């Protein structure tokens, strides 16, 4: 029996029993929808997380004073390390390090004319903050020689005060202890959108280290952002940095974090969530598959006489098996196509209504389709075999 | 005259639970090309059983069935199905058409399993339907046809692969006398064209048409009569 003829037979059969067939495919359609929607939601969650990390780049190593807790009671709590320019030099001369950018940070009240607000003020070394420097929207970025100059995050400039802030305006900052200092706005940053591990640049002010001294006395840094020269070796480079620092901070505590390990851990969790969701979809497919087996068994039973006729006019076992198996697979293909179309639609709708990140990928759709076809094909094996084994005379109703 | 079917020492026993039901005992028949044979006998005498064996729908319990030199016992299930599709055309008392398919498609079916091309089998099926007088009923489904028309579709289908033997198990049993007579003359015509026909019948009139009558009783051949 030729394949096109089997197909023709199957299609003919479908057009004769549309209702029953459609009803029976509902389980598969629902299963495929579930797989597509759940995978898309999972993919969306994952993309959201990687997106947040993407901005920061995975080549970043963070060095902070203190941080490490005493693991046991016996172990004395170490004093936090003082991170200074000496550490910057040591880190920058470590193999694999491209740059080390020190930062400090405090929370301050902002006054513009007679209006007040508050934000965190971050002090930076302008030459080492290429990413920030690249995101200037208007005005200019900070320069090494700047003292009482400030670069303003997007949201503060746009919405914190009645008037939009522009380069050239003056802001007065108040530190908790009462110190105050007037700064001149030199630049405004573009919108970053998603926040980052370092906070949310849209709601921060940036000044030079010298500039921050106007509000508080700092003799060390609260954070050093180290850029490694390759993402692959970032863990190894972090170890090198650790070794170099441990020599001069023997009895002091500091912490070294890599974003890569952090992001991998989180990505791992989301991958797990994603496949758990897909697993739920797979279970609904399994249930659908059992439904299909039942329907195919009924179909075979309905057509015992017909199978007898097929055999009497020369159909081999293989012909009969192929016919029923293909009928089942085709049911899966049609249901699968309907399922992925509806699934994609529902996913996008959920994304719209829930304002939720949803990512529908081709591989998700293909996976949904493949599972649909696979399920119905497997579901058809047993009924097709039963059909092929029928004895022609008995099937003809003992002629 | 060439022998096309040889039935040699055939026994057929059905097993019903623990009881053996003998349906045929030591049957020997030789059928030659172009013969028109009637098989007669009381109900339960084994007529249908014999037809099914000759038609390769079943295998003997012992003995040999040889169709055109090929021993049925030595063929696999798939080979047997092929032989059946190619060498045998069956006409059943209850027609056994597929209700979901129209007349044309029903006649095409045997050719699908012999892997004829689509165009070839459509043309052949049309010609056969015209030959049996159903040129204007090709797209009717069995439910939309009369009994006699259905039987003619079944005959067209049986002839689809140009079989060596046409087997008909009580082909007029479900038809009224007049329609039965029409079917009968169709068989006669086919036989005149050289087709070998074996038919089971209770009707002495049909038997009258045939060249040889084989009588069965309790699974045994009890008489063989050649008409002139
Ligand atoms: N599948 C079967 N299982 C058990 N016994 C069977 C089977 N088929 C036939 N028989 C038995 O074999 C014997 C012959 O049956 P068969 O159908 O060949 O008779 P028949 O001559 O065609 O009768 P009828 O004129 O009523 O059609 C009967 O006794 C019948 O009961
Ligand atoms: Mg019978």
Image: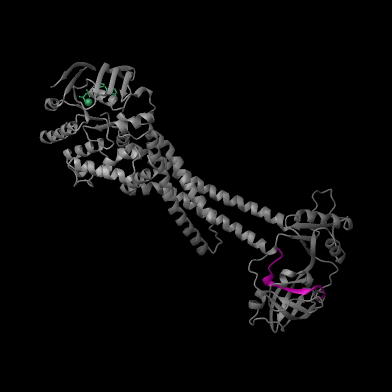
Query: Is any atom of residue A94 visible in this view?
Result: yes
Q: Position of residue A16 (x, y in %)?
A: 31, 47
Q: Quadrant of the N terminus of chain A?
A: top left
Q: Residue at x 86, y 57 (%)?
A: A244
Quarter of the figure with residue A52: bottom right
Q: Position of residue B30 (x, y in %)?
A: 25, 20
Q: Quadrant of the C terminus of chain A?
A: top left
Task: Give the answer, above or below, for where A227 lies relative to B225.
Answer: below
Q: Position of residue A152 (x, y in %)?
A: 70, 76
Quarter of the figure with residue B38: top left
Answer with left or right where residue A56 lies relative to residue B112. right
| Furthest residue in direction front, as rendered | B1
Closer-to-camera residue (A308/A56) = A308
Quarter of the figure with residue B94: top left
Answer with left or right where residue B178 lies relative to residue A291. left
Ligand 1 quadrant?
top left
Is A348 contained in the magenta span?
no
Task: Give the answer, above or below, for where A197 lies relative to A282.
Answer: below
Is A203 contained in the magenta span?
yes
Answer with left or right where residue B52 lies relative to residue A330. left
Q: Which residues are magenta?
A: A197-210
Task: Give the answer, above or below, for where A325 lies relative to A246.
Answer: above
Query: Is any atom of residue A68 visible in this view?
Result: no
Closer-to-camera residue (A360/A218) = A360
């Amino acid at each position: 029996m030729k394949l096109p003829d089997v197909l023709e037979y199957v299609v003919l059969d479908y057009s004769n029993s549309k209702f029953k067939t459609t009803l029976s495919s509902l389980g598969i359609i629902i299963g495929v929808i579930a797989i597509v929607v759940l995978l898309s939601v999972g993919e969306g969650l994952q993309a959201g997380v990687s997106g947040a990390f993407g901005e920061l780049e995975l080549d970043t190593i963070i060095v902070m004073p203190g941080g490490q807790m005493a693991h046991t009671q016996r172990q004395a709590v170490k004093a936090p390390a003082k991170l200074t320019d000496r550490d910057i030099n040591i880190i920058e001369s470590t193999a694999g390090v491209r740059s080390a950018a020190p930062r400090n940070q405090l929370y301050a009240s902002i006054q513009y004319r007679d209006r007040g607000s508050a934000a965190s003020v971050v002090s930076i070394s302008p030459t080492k903050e290429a990413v920030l420097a690249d995101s200037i929207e208007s005005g200019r970025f900070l320069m090494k020689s700047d003292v009482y100059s400030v670069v303003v995050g997007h949201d503060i400039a746009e919405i914190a005060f009645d008037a939009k802030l522009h380069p050239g305006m003056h802001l007065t900052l108040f530190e908790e202890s009462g110190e105050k200092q007037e700064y001149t706005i030199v630049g405004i940053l573009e919108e970053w959108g998603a926040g980052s591990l370092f906070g949310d640049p849209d709601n921060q002010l940036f000044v030079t280290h010298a500039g921050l001294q106007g509000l508080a006395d700092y003799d060390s840094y609260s954070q050093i952002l180290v850029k490694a020269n390759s993402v692959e070796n970032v863990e190894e480079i972090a170890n090198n940095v650790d070794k170099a620092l441990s020599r001069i901070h023997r009895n002091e505590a500091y912490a070294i974090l890599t974003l890569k390990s952090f992001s991998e851990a989180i990505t791992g969790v989301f991958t797990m969530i994603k496949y758990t969701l897909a697993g739920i979809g797979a279970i609904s497919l399994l249930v659908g598959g059992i439904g299909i087996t039942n329907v195919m068994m009924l179909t075979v039973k309905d057509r015992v006489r017909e199978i007898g006729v097929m055999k009497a006019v020369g159909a081999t076992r293989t012909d009969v098996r192929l016919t029923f198996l293909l009928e089942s697979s085709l049911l899966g293909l049609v249901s699968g196509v309907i399922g992925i179309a509806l699934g994609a639609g529902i996913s996008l709708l959920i994304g719209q209504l829930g304002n939720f990140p949803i990512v529908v990928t081709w591989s998700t759709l293909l996976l949904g389709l493949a599972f649909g076809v696979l399920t119905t094909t497997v579901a058809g094996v047993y009924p097709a075999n039963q059909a092929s084994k029928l004895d022609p005379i008995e099937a003809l109703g003992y002629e | 005259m060439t022998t096309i079917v040889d039935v040699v020492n055939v026994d057929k026993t059905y097993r019903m639970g623990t009881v053996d039901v003998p349906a045929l005992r030591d049957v020997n028949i030789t059928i030659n090309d172009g013969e028109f044979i009637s098989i007669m006998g009381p109900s339960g005498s084994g007529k249908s059983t014999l037809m099914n064996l000759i038609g390769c729908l079943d295998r003997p319990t012992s003995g040999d069935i040889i169709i055109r030199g090929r021993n049925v016992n030595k063929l696999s299930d798939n080979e047997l199905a092929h032989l059946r599709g190619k060498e045998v055309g069956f006409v059943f008392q209850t027609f056994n058409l597929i209700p979901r398919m129209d007349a044309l498609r029903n006649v095409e079916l045997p050719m699908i399993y012999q892997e004829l091309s689509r165009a070839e089998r459509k043309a052949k099926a049309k010609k056969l339907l015209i030959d049996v007088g159903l040129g204007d009923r090709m797209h009717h489904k069995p439910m939309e046809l009369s009994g006699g028309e259905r039987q003619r579709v079944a005959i067209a289908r049986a002839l689809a692969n140009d079989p060596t033997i046409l087997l008909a198990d009580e082909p007029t049993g479900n038809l009224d006398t007049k329609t039965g007579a029409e079917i009968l003359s169709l068989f006669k015509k086919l036989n005149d064209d050289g087709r070998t026909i074996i038919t089971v019948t209770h009707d002495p009139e049909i038997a009258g048409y045939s060249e040889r009558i084989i009588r069965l009783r309790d699974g045994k051949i009890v008489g063989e009569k050649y008409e002139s």
